[in-house]
Image: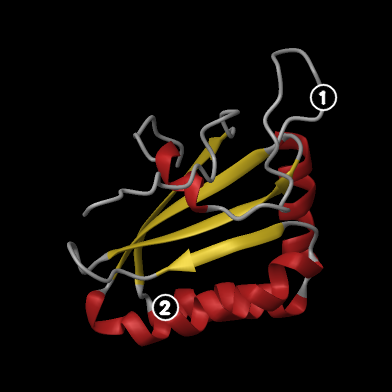
Amino acid sequence: MLSGTALAATALIAPRGFGLESHSPGSQPMAIVCIIRYEIDPYQRDAFKEYAARWGRIIPRCGASLLGYFLPWQGTNYVAWGLIGGLDSLSAYERYQERLQQDAEARENFKFAAERRFIVHEERNFVEVVAGALETAALSRQGQ
């Protein structure tokens, strides 16, 4: 489910080297990051952690870059995130999704999630990195 939520800022945690360069309108290539927001059963946190760890092997094999999966730490106990990059267009994302459906380990991971029911809700947002707004380090604060 796509929605217009203000989740784009979470893409700023993506490390360099994952095809996240920004572009000018009309130029190529365009870097797309898929941000997945999960609502999980907080009592099945370990099951979600296992599910997320499995994607570390699967996603790169299927043609995308796994930027990371993130479990709740403080704040809500039921919101987790997945960030997938290395895609230059939505059609590249669609080809990646097709490869996932062909991958036996990916199908098994989807089955694991369906059987255990630890994902209550999932939404995907596609964002583009803004030039000059990625990995901007904190200024040193002398005297503090």
Q: Label 2 neighbourhood size at 10 Å, few (<14), some (14-19), many (20+)? A: many
Rendered residue at 50%/45% (across/down): 11
Residue hosting label 2: 48
Return the residue nearer the eye: 67 or 98.
67
Residue topped by disc 1: 28
> Image quarter for residue 102?
bottom right
Q: Is residue 9 left or right of residue 76?
A: right
The percent coordinates of residue 89 (x first, y second) are 74, 34
What quarter of the picture does the C terminus occupy? bottom left
Give me the residue at 49% from left, 67% from top: 69
Please give the name of the residue rendered at 44% of the width and 37% of the height, measured from the top-left corner. 8
Task: Determine whether the residue tagged by mark 2 lies in a helix, strand or loop.
Answer: helix
| Mark 1 residue type | Gln
* Nearer-the-camera pick, 112 or 30: 30
The x and y percentages for residue 107 are: 67, 74
Q: Looking at the image, is 66 positioned above or below residue 48?
A: above
Count of numbered labels shown in the rendering:
2
Whether 43 is drawn above or below 131: the answer is: below
- Which tag, 2 or 1, sits closer to the chain's start? 1
User: Can you give x and y, in whole percent of width and height, for residue 138 in the image?
Assistant: 40, 47
Q: Secondary structure at mark 1?
A: loop
Residue sitting at 49 percent across and 52 percent down? Answer: 13
Amino acid beneath label 2? Phe
Query: Badge 1, how many Cα within 10 Å: few under 14, some, many 20+?
Result: few
C-alpha span from label 2 to label 1: 36 Å
Image quadrant in which the N terminus is located = top left
Mark 2 vs mark 1, foreground winner is: 1
Q: List the single residue furthest toward the front.
A: 143
